[in-house]
Image (cartoon, rainbow, N blue to C red):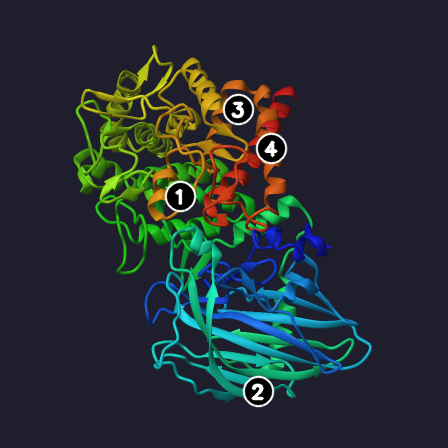
Amino acid sequence: MGNIVFDKDELVHLGYSLEREMLRTSRSGAFACTTLCFCNTRKYHGLLIAPQPQIDNEYHVLLSSFDETIIQYDVPFHLALHRYPNEIYSPKGHKYLINYEISKTAKHTFSVADIKLSKEVLLIHNQDRLVIKYMVEESDKPFKIQFNPLLAFRQRHKLSKANSLVNMDYDKVNNGAAFQLYPEYKPLFIQFSKDDVQYNHSPDWYYNFEYIKEAERGYECNEDLFMPGCFETTLKKGDVLFVTASTQEMDAKEIKNLYSSELRVREEISSYEAELRRAAKMFFVEKDDKVEVIAGYPWFGRWGRDTFISLPGLCIGLNDMKLFKKAIDTLIGDMSQGLFPNIGSGEQIAYNSVDAPMWFFWAMQQYSDYTGKKKQIWKEYKEVMQSILCSYRDGTNHNIRMLDNCLIWAGEDGKALTWMDAVVDGVPVTQRKGMCVEINALWYNAIMFSLELAKDAKDKDFIRDWEEIAERIPTEFKATFWDKNYGWLADYVDGYYKDFTVRPNMVIATSLKYSCLSPKICQLILDRVEKELFTPFGLRTLSPTHKDYHDVYYGNQEQRDRAYHQGTAWTWLLGHFVEGYLKIYGDCALEIAERIYEGFRLHIKDYGVGGIAEIFDGNPPHSSKGSISQAWSVAEVIRIKYMIGKYKQEKEGEKV
């Protein structure tokens, strides 16, 4: 039995099962995502969502749903569930669900009349290929089963509407059929492991599927899906049937072997730690010799900032530093003028991030501490590091530049260059143009880390160029951001204006290996953060005492953007809170660190099953919001566990 299990009472209760989503991914980039009861509630839901590089750099929903109908004693039992306008659910197949568990696969079990049928879903590791395994565990007599594929063939951020351009034809293939709704798409091959599966072609549109999560988010929420026809076969007790959906045809005789070989390399998910490792694996996508990190499912793509913040935790959890280097090197290949891509890839890259290059240094620092490969890092990455530092010192895009006080200033009207990046009507919701506290904390850490590597390599020229700047920064940082009357750091400074709004960015100044601050100041900052910003699932982005505080993240795009960094709690910040706390409070910090880590043990059953949400409401009960599994959320929870273990190990070493 897997670590995560749901019973019949939970699955048939739509108020429960519709709020929990399952996710399966492939290293090729394809994924499957829907609710526990197979009722799609988002436009991002589907059983095969895959890249279509011949069209664009986005993901496309190909197979939205695969609806089964069992026919026993001439009575049809529909296992599917869909929502339509006016809160109509039909057919109500969820009532037959009796169990769902995650182990090597995602396994549902249905009980219909005298039939018990299990359904296991997985995606093949390096292919855009879904495989479903059906097994008849109990049945008094043979029965018919029908399969109706519902096709979308559209980009994941859009919706499908009935139209006359759709190609209603099909091609017969080995044990199945292929469908190509529009000429720009690759065909979708649906194939079965049995050669007696009959396909009956009866193309038609099914109308007005309603996605309630899109309605809640203020988006268009109704979709039409194309049903090309029906597959049918007969099954009996003990029978196993495999079906695959992919953009490539395969030998149907090999489906079972493919499924079996996939299972052999998968880890049994029998613990919380194993679940986090499985979640960590899901964010990596390999394209040729490149590796990208998906920021979050089901709607994010690659983000530079998120990649650098996520990589240490993800790769520590997987103990795979080769993957770390590949992802780093992939982003380095897209550098421009000292900046990394904020979002996008290929020809659709935006470089509007002042912090991504600074987080690159932090990520490399974690890699260095984990592997001890200082000389190799300097040999391979000195040129990149020096290029970034010089670009920031001398000035680059978006008015990013070092001032006379050796601190970094950045900003443009209408642009949000830090991670607090929501913009409404051309105006950043969180104004931060100027010298930002975490940017300058990271800037100092970046220089000091580079000097650490340079000294180890005896690189006198680099040391000469940067040592004086490094010596000046702590004094200037404190003079710029610290005010003893407040007892915490300014969030940003622009000229004579200092913004002392209580936000979590200052916690990063306490967590870094090279900090500009004394232990006493770090303690005051951490105490303030704990008092006003700490929640069990993340740090609030704004103090509840502030007039602009948003207690919940809800509503249309504008409403959500105004709450995104104005009170909403973010899990990834907890890693830096714990790191700073351990540095200052030592043994006394272990209890809160362990409580934070254990707090997510139950959460992984509550939203994106097996993952950790992007964000949480600032107010209790701190409901899960945003993406259902976010890379830096998973990564920092893993890193918290690593920091706890490392701290204990070092303490034991001191005793010896």
Where is mark 1, residue-wise?
Answer: 308
| Visible residue check, residue 80 | yes
Please tell me whether mark 1 sits on a helix, a strand or a loop. helix
Please tell me whether mark 4 sits on a helix, a strand or a loop. helix
Please tell me whether mark 2 sits on a helix, a strand or a loop. strand
In the image, residue 341 lies at what x, y percent? 30, 49
Measured Cα–Cα span from mark 2 to mark 1:
48 Å
Measured Cα–Cα span from mark 3 to mark 1:
22 Å
Where is mark 2, residue-wise?
Answer: 199
Q: Nearer the viewer, mark 3 or mark 4?
A: 3
| Visible residue check, residue 102 | no
Q: Nearer the viewer, mark 3 or mark 2?
A: 2
In the image, residue 631 lies at what x, y percent? 47, 47
Q: Where residue 582 is drawn, which disc sits there?
A: 3
**Residue 533 as seen in the image, left or right of residue 342:** right
Q: Amino acid at mark 1?
A: Phe
**Residue 128 as seen in the image, left or right of residue 651:** left
Measured Cα–Cα span from mark 4 to mark 1:
22 Å
- Most distant residue in the front direction: 86
Q: Amino acid at mark 4?
A: Gly
Q: Nearer the viewer, mark 2 or mark 1?
A: 2
- Most distant residue in the right direction: 140
Q: Amino acid at mark 2?
A: Tyr
Q: Write the residue at 60% across / 69% down.
A: 91
Q: Earlier in the sequence, mark 2 or mark 1?
A: 2
Where is mark 4, residue-wise?
Answer: 645
Please tell me whether mark 3 sits on a helix, a strand or a loop. helix
In the image, residue 145 lies at what x, y percent? 67, 79
Q: Earlier in the sequence, mark 3 or mark 1?
A: 1
Query: Compared with residue 241, is residue 332 higher up or lower down, i.e. above or below?
Result: above
Measured Cα–Cα span from mark 4 to mark 2:
56 Å
Q: Earlier in the sequence, mark 4 or mark 2?
A: 2
